[in-house]
Image (cartoon, rainbow, N blue to C red):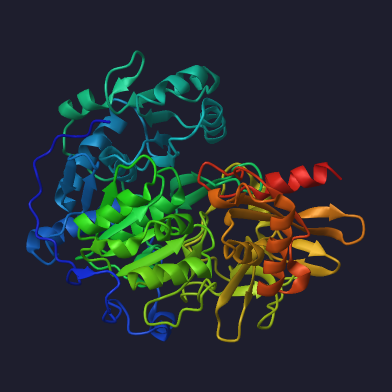
Amino acid sequence: MTFLKIKPFTTHIIPRVCSRLIGTSQKFYAPQNFSDYEEITRTYKLDQPEFFNFASDILDKWTAAEKDGSRAPNPALWWIDGEGKEVKWSFDELGFHSRKVANILTAACDLKPGDRVMVILPRVPEWWLFNVACMRTGLVIIPGPTQLTAKDILYRLQTSGARCIITSQDLAPAVDTVSTQAPLLKTKMTVCGARESWLNFQALYTAANDKHTCVRTRSTDPMSIYFTSGTTGFQKMAEHSQCSYGLGMTITGKYWQDLTPSDVFWNISDTGWAKSAWSSIFSPWIQGSCVFAHYMPRVNPTVVLETFTNYPITVFCSLSSVYRMLVLCNPENYKFKSLQHCVGGGDPLSPLVMEQWKAKTGLDIYEGYGQTETVLVCGNFKGMKIKPGSMGKSPGAYDVQIIDADGNVLPPDQEGDIAIRIAPHRPFYLFTQYTGDPEKTASTRRGDFYLTGDRAKKDKEGYFWFVGRSDDVISSSGYRIGPFEIENALMEHPAVVESAVVGSPDPVRGEVVKAFIVLSPTYIAHDQETLTKEIQEHVKKVTAPYKYPRKIEFVQQLPKTISGKVRRNELRNKEWGKA
């Protein structure tokens, strides 16, 4: 993958902490942006302006701060490929390049405000440029992961009505096999090299003008559409406004990630998912932080640990599954230059992994919870007591409650649906709608609340405890059992590498807990009947006896979405198809 040729950016990185050796005693670092959790809930408030555009109202203001010296001389984007290539852009340079790209979109692509653009690119600098250029031109960007098949691409083109697709040479042949079946698609562009019937981005960029006036967008105008991960059914198109992420992510970057303009922030997530928008664009750049990016087509835990050693990354954000990989690679043997704050999300984090990461690195993992449709809903914040296994507390921007089937708020320690109050006023931090699906959009409302689709409990101190997706909860002999707790218990057994728990039909109990387990290589040769009993006894001891998996099936791998989330619905359907 080629990238734009630009002059080097000379910078003096100002990490917030000095270099240290992992595993040694660590000083407690106070939060940078707030004094305690109560301050967040007491003082945080954002008003929705009539007009807002992230490019002009956030990014261009950081350019001005660079020029007047009020921002630390830290890059806006610092990209490496692991093989010696490196890009460092200031906010001024980011603006320069994104204005040229904006002119390409409006001129060569003949796109107008409101048109939809699908962008399927790996972690290359151009991905960031197209995101910013779409904001500058009022276009609606639709990111997509590079693992999409031709069938996936066709589904997204047809359902979104995208008029333009921008991708790499690797995916262009797949697009060509289906593009004629997407009648609204008018323009195809590849970011490197020439291809028949495709626009050549590199050639267009060389000739493009760098003068461009940002479109004046209303804060309620559409900015992006993200296809949800599809763990429980067909992928939905979650539409976000210009300000939902563009302003709403303030609470994510300022309080949960605790970012400042002198931070170097590395988020590992695929460019096709909302998590990358959360933590590779909006939350860090709202705070004026440096976004660090590693091309790394697939997550390699050794490369991640070496990157901590070689670069002054101060804040790290990743999926829980990546932390599970990292703790197995002896992180205590690496020297981290500057890392001091770790956050995790995307899927529930096992208390065991949190414990191991802390023991091996001296660092806590501050877990957070949110969705494609929201910003941060719950989180663990610096200076706040961490309860392993808990999602933390609501940050105050939302009124988050646990409600029953009638929309009533439940008392502490009772399981119910995680819900956000939307009456009398709907928070602008929420998504606008499921595009093209008014019935699905309406189904997310229950009384005065928006339903996240997840279930949890809230304890007396206000901490939320995840139970599972509403569709995943198992009802057995009158007991309601969440799969997450059982999966955590299974992960504590040395034989278990991965697991997924679903309900399986039973003539007496209605359904029972069934666990699909991927075994550690050292246990594959063990007698499976004996191992099944051993694992069942282990779960009985770790959780309540009625929760243990009465059925266990050992598998080589679990079905997952292309974002890496386990498709429990596929396993559940398989079970009930046998009934």
- Relative to 235, 188 lies left or right: left
Work out which residue is located at the far top of the displayed protein and give it: 196
Q: Nearer the viewer, residue 202 or 168?
A: 168
Examine the image and state in which quarter residue 31 appears: bottom left
Residue 237 image position (x, y, % from top left):
55, 44
Residue 472 image position (x, y, % from top left):
70, 57
Residue 96 image position (x, y, % from top left):
17, 43
Examine the image and state in which quarter residue 359 appears: bottom left
In the rendered view of the protein, which quadrant contains the C terminus?
top right
Residue 251 image position (x, y, % from top left):
39, 69
Q: Is residue 228 above or below residue 153?
A: below
- Relative to 67, 499 lies left or right: right
Q: Residue at 41% of width from left, 45% of height from top? A: 270
- Relative to 509, 400 lies left or right: left
In the rendered view of the protein, which quadrant contains the N terminus?
top left
Q: Is residue 442 above or below residue 151?
A: below
Q: Is residue 131 above or below residue 549?
A: above
Q: Residue at 60% of width from left, 86% of height from top? A: 460
Asked whether residue 53 is in view, the answer is: no
Asked whether residue 149 is in view, the answer is: yes
